[in-house]
Amino acid sequence: MGAGRKWAVVAVALAALAGAPSVARGGDEGQLLVAKGEIPEDRLVDVAIDLFSPGVKEGDPSPLLKKGIRAAVRKSESRYVPIHLRNTLQSTGQWGAVRVAPGGASWAELLVTGTITKSNGKDLAMRVTAKDASGRVWVERDYKQGADTAAYAKDRPVDGRDPFQALYNRIANDLVRARDKRKPAELVEMRDVARLRFAAGMAPDPYAAYLVTRGKGRVGVARLPAADDPMMARVAAIRDRDQMFVDTLNEYYADFYARMDKPYDDWRAYTYEEQAALDSINRAATLKKILGGLAILGGILMDPQSDRVGVKDVLVLGGIAAIQSGFEDGKETVIHKAALTELADSFEGEVTPLLLDVDGKVVQLTGSAEAQFTQWRLLLQDIAATDAALPANINLLPMAPAEVVQP
């Protein structure tokens, strides 16, 4: 067989591949490990989930915009994903308190952090890390999942099914398996370290000395404070109030989640269709360009002496036409990218300012939930340092500016 005919055969084979349907990745739906009975209290680990990193640099949304996805949507997803993960963990009955803690908390018994690496309605990928208070890594891995298209069906039942629930189930199951590997003594020390790390964060002197850093950066207990230590009792009260505040913020996150749920589901459904069309066009355009190039090359290499029916001209002209068609398909991708951009809407929002009664003064926390959380932690450190009274009340009703003290 001549060189030209070989290239023609290759071109035909690739043309067949171009017409083959794409294979959708399986749902990989795992059963969520739900507690079958009451979990012993000493196995109920409290979990803090930080807001996920959106996977895009601040002030540089261009990489996402080139893909047709607004950075604002990814930032909203960085809130939505940890809230949905929290809901999934809570539904298992395997854990103690599960809270979303913006900015994280090094003193959490178990802290879960993550980065969204891909999210377009068609595919979701993220890197998740879970570390306990001592610094021991429980989970650190990449998770990827194709959308469960049944969740996008127009006649789908309103059952709250998430198209990527299988991914959340795998994370939850991995965390349960990691906890089950921990010995009782490890969980006891983890709780002591969490308690002392919070105390050291509020009052470094003297509680930092109660902790020791060991190999691999692990934090352990050097010694425990006396059972009747009055300062430790105050720190415990501050910690309880901190958890109450985080619970209040989680109510806002729950409201954010509820408001975002419907438009976000619609956005993902529409984006799935757009992304699928975009991927199909990109594949077809690329293959047409390759086929066109091979056809032209096959025509050039064909021996003129053996070409009695003008195959060479057909290959060359057909190859040029295929390349032009590929470029036309490439132009169509711009239309779909524009559609993706239009479908992406901002879910950013401010949280109602929280008003705290601290030592007889009303202190107002303003801004987003994350900003208020930061202000709160600074306020707690001041309270611990000055021995001021703990906030007696969280009043969500607006008050006159004259009655409000900024932190």
Image (spheres, rainbow, N blue to C red):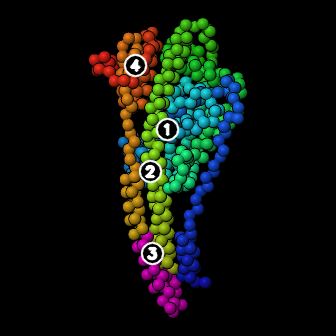
The residues tagged by marks 2 and 1 sit, at their Cα atoms, a distance apart of: 20 Å
| Percent coordinates x, y for residue 77 in the rendering | 46, 42
- The amino acid sitting under disc 3 is Ala
Residue 322 tag number: 3
Mark 4 and mark 3 residues within 8 Å of each other at the beta carbon: no
Mark toward the viewer: 2 or 3:
2
- The amino acid sitting under disc 2 is Trp
Task: Please name the residue that numbered disc 1 is placed on.
Answer: 52
Decide whether residue 24 is among the magenta residues: no
Residue 330 visible somewhere in the drawing: yes
Mark toward the viewer: 4 or 1:
4
Task: Please name the residue that numbered disc 2 is placed on.
Answer: 267
Relative to residue 191, is residue 139 depicted above or below? below
- The magenta span reads 299-326
Task: Please name the residue that numbered disc 4 is placed on.
Answer: 356
Tag 1 or tag 4, which sits nearer the N-term?
A: 1
